[in-house]
Image (spheres, rainbow, N blue to C red):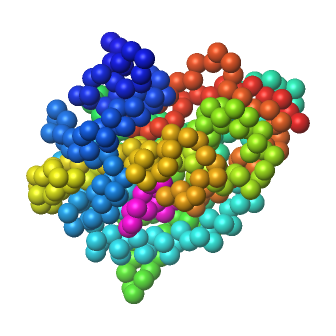
Amino acid sequence: MDTTAPGTDVPTDLTTAPEIAPDGGAALLAWLGKMRADTPVWQDGTGAWHVFRSADVRRVSTDAQLFSSDTTRLTSPGDQAPPGTLLVIDPPEHRKLRRLVSQAFTPKVVADLAPRITEVTRELLAAVEPDATEFDLVDVLAYPLPVIVIAELLGVPSADRALFRRWAEALMALQVDDPSTGEQLAVAIEEMEAYLNAQIRDRRARPREDLLTRLVESSIDGERLTDEEVGNFTALLLLAGHVTTTMLLGNVLLCLEDAPGGYERVRADPSAVEPLLEEVLRLRPPFPRVVRVTTADAEVAGTVIPADSLVWAWVVSANHDEREFPDPERFDVRRKPNTHAAFGHGIHFCLGAPLARLEGRIALDLLFERFEHLRVAPGAQVPFHAGGVYGVQRLPVTTRPR
C-alpha cells in the first residue's frame, strides 16, 4: 500500500511510524518532520507516547526523576534497549555503576587501541584483491572490524567471534511489531549471558591483561561490580558497540553517495574526516530512538503524559529538527556546532562513543588511502535492517585502487 502523498515524501498514513527498511528511511524522516511540525507529542495505538522535537527529546532523555530508564516492567524483550544495566537504571545506582565501569573502560584504554585498530583494518582491506572492482563494504570491513576489536579488548578467544555475530544479528533484526524477533533476541541474550558468566568466573580465578579483568577488579571505596553488572556492561559493549560502528561505516558511504563529489572532497582533506563522522551520526544515528517510562504525570509541549506511560524519544527526529540545526536535511561536513544526540545526553551519554569514533576515523583514513574511488555499486540492491537500527545489511561498492 502506498502511504506517500503524490509528489511529496510525506506519508498520508500518520497513524504509525514508517519502517526504515523499504526506502532507507525517506518516508520515516518525512513522517517525523510532519510530526515535529503538527503533533510534537503523540500517542500511538498501543498507548505508548512519542516525542519528536529536539528540546523535548533532550528533556525526556535527561530528566531521570520524571522519565525513568527502568522500563523493564512495561516492555517486552522486543521493545527494550540492548541489554546493559547502565541503560535501565536511574541515579543514584546508575552513578555508582558508571563510576566503576569508567574506572576500567578509560579514555586511555580506548586511545591505546589505535595501533591495533589500524592493523586490523589493514588486514581486512588486504582481503580485497588489488585488481578488484567491487566488494561488499559491510562484509569486508564494517561488520568484522568492531567484532575483532571488542573481542580482543575483552580477551575473548578469536574462535568465539562467530557467536558475537549471531547475537548482534538478533539485536539488529528486532522489530517492535514482530514478537518472534523479541523471542529470538531473548534466546540470544540467554546464550550470551551464560557465555559471559563463564568468562567472568575465569577472570576472577585467573586474571589477565584485558578489559574483563579490569572490570572484575574495578573498585571504588571498597565497592566492586557484581558478576551480573560486569556481564551486563560487557553485553552492552558487545552488542551496541558492535552495531554502532557497523551502521556508522555503511552510513558514511551512503551519505557521501548523496553528495556529488563528496568522496573525493573528503579524501582530499583529511581534516574533514572527524566532522564527517559527526554529520553522518546526526543524519543517520545507529539507534534512532530511546525509551523511558514516566514516574508521574508529565507535561511535554503542552500535552500531559500520564504516569507509568512508555515514552519514545526520537533521536533521529531531534537530529533533523530545524529548531536546532539550520537547513537540517543538508549534508554539511563542516556543520558547527553539531549538537546531535546520536550518543545520548547527560548521564546516559554513551561510554563507547570514543571507541566508535576512533574506529570510524581509522577505517575511513585507510579506505581513503587505499581507494581513489569508492561508490555504491550502480543498480545494487542495498537492504536496510528492518528492526530498531538505522543502517544497511549489505553495501556493494565499486572501487578503483590508487
Asked if residue 368 can be seen in this view, the reply is yes
Residue 370 versus residue 153: which sits nearer the camera? 370
| Residue in the picture at 62% in, 32% down | 258
Q: Quick check: 257 above or below 111?
A: above
Q: How many marks?
A: 0
**Image x and y of residue 159, in percent:** 61, 44
**Image x and y of residue 157, in percent:** 61, 51
Residue 323 versus residue 376: which sits nearer the camera? 323
Residue 214 versus residue 390: which sits nearer the camera? 390
**Image x and y of residue 303, in percent:** 15, 50
Q: Is residue 134 left or right of residue 347?
A: right
Residue 345 versus residue 176: which sits nearer the camera? 345
| Residue in the picture at 44% in, 80% down | 219
| Magenta region, main secondary structure | loop
Q: Where does the magenta region start and end?
A: 340-352
* Magenta region includes residue 2: no
**Image x and y of residue 371, in percent:** 81, 37
